[in-house]
């Protein structure tokens, strides 16, 4: 038995980056402290309000909802509402939606299920079957963000929280560097609110994926392992993930360094302020005259039949993990 570095109880986790062994209680304290600090840095909770939490039923968003509920338990002026999205991915989404609503019920958090079918008249399965020219995630991620933002705004939410963890953030930062996509990099954390866009927050961005999983296990939050979404290869993200994991193994703390480095650059950089317009099709905020969702769906509908194929198995692009494409 390896004792906790802060007390004599048996440790449940070793953090190589900090050199600490932590028992269940001190581990929980450490996780919740990091989340509180991240929330404080957003500086938006002093006046209370409604916080929309994107809940997929996976471990990250489940831990997010659970910890936010605990952290805000003494704040009667803050109300959580869980938003779940049914993208229409059969064999995958049904199970995660069930897990998600069971958790929200257990935590007594009101929840709403939003559906691609109802909002856009099409599902990710249908898109995946018909458009073989690009990965379904290209559509699915954009449409999900659109729907979450729209609903959170209609609910007058002060923030929309997503479950991205340290690994997701470090991967996204590196990916954007590798692609030279500086604009997208700075859009990750806009400095000022943009018209029509609900402020996006990522309370778990300082928690390593492994620790999110351990926390979930210790709290019985994620009892059932779900299948991954069948759609994505996400080859480049997977390569970056493996590369970061190798670096982390050889140089503990690398993921934190990537995040810290990015946060520093962001502080120094001027705000990449993009004046948003209203989409001429749906009225949602857009970078040009039409929002990304309407552009994609219009392009999809206009695609010649040669680019579409009926009856193709979506697993043709069999991927690894469910995407954090949001
Ligand atoms: Fe949608 Fe995520 Fe599945 Fe891609 S991996 S199709 S973004 S649910
Ligand atoms: Zn639109």
Image: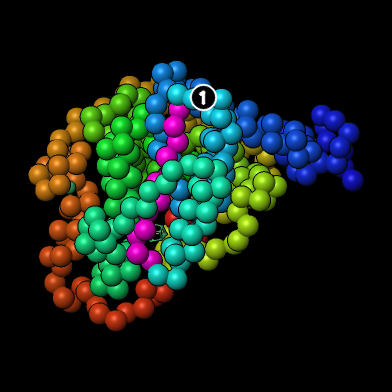
Residue 159 as seen in the image, left or right of residue 295? right
Q: In this view, does 221 lie above or below 79?
A: below
Q: In this view, does 6 lie above or below 282?
A: above
Query: Mark 1, residues whose alpha carbon is within 10 Å: few (<14), some, or many (≥20)?
Result: few
Residue 60 as seen in the image, left or right of residue 78? right
Q: Residue at x 83, y 36 (%)?
A: 4
* Colouring style: rainbow
**Whole-percent x, y for residue 122 in the image:** 24, 64
Residue 14 as seen in the image, left or right of residue 34? right
**Whole-percent x, y for residue 309 in the image:** 24, 78
Q: Main secondary structure of the magenta part?
A: strand
Number of marks present in the image shown? 1
Q: Residue at x 30, y 73 (%)?
A: 129
Q: Can residue 167 be seen in this view?
A: no
294 or 184, which is in the foreground? Answer: 294
- The picture quadrant where one finds residue 31 is top right
Look at the image and say whether residue 81 sits in the magenta stretch. Answer: yes
**Whole-percent x, y for residue 171 in the image:** 49, 45
Q: Residue at x 25, y 80 (%)?
A: 310
| In the image, farthest residue toward the top | 46
Does any atom of ligand 1 lie closer than 8 Å to the CB of label 1? no
Q: Tag 1's secondary structure?
A: loop
Q: Which residue is drawn at 42% across and 40% down?
A: 81
102 or 7, which is in the foreground? Answer: 102
Q: Mark 1 points at which residue?
A: 75
- The picture quadrant where one finds residue 230 is bottom left
- Range shown magenta: 78-89
Look at the image and say whether residue 228 sits in the magenta stretch. Answer: no
Q: Is residue 216 visible?
A: yes
| In the image, farthest residue toward the bottom | 311
**Whole-percent x, y for residue 52 in the image:** 40, 38
Q: In this view, does 325 lie above or below 303?
A: above
């Amino acid at each position: 038995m390896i004792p906790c570095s802060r007390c004599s109880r048996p440790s449940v986790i070793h953090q190589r980056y900090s050199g600490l062994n932590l028992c269940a209680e001190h581990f929980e304290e450490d996780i919740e402290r990091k989340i509180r600090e991240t929330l404080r840095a957003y500086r938006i909770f002093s006046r209370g309000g409604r916080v929309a939490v994107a809940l997929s039923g996976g471990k990250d968003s489940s831990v997010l909802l659970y910890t936010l509920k605990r952290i805000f338990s003494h704040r009667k002026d803050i109300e959580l509402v869980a938003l779940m999205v049914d993208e229409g991915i059969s064999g995958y989404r049904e199970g995660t939606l069930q897990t998600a609503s069971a958790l929200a019920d257990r935590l007594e958090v009101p929840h709403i299920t939003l559906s691609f079918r109802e909002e856009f008249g099409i599902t990710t399965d249908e898109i995946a079957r018909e458009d073989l020219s690009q990965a379904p995630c290209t559509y699915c991620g954009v449409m999900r963000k659109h729907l979450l933002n729209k609903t959170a705004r209609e609910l007058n939410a002060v923030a929309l929280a997503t479950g991205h963890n340290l690994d997701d953030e470090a991967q996204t930062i590196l990916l954007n560097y590798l692609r030279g996509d500086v604009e997208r990099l700075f859009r990750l954390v806009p400095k000022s609110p943009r018209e029509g866009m609900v402020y996006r927050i990522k309370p778990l961005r300082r928690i390593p994926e492994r620790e999110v999983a351990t926390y979930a296990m210790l709290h019985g939050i994620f009892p059932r392992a779900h299948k991954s979404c069948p759609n994505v290869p996400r080859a480049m993200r997977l390569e970056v993930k493996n590369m970061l994991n190798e670096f982390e193994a050889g140089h503990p703390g690398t993921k934190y360094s990537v995040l810290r480095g990015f946060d520093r650059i962001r502080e120094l950089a001027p705000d990449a302020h993009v004046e948003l317009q209203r989409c001429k099709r749906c009225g949602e905020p857009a970078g040009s005259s039409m929002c990304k969702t309407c552009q994609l769906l219009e392009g999809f509908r206009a695609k010649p039949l040669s680019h579409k194929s009926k009856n193709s198995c979506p697993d043709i692009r069999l991927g690894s993990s469910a995407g954090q494409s949001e």
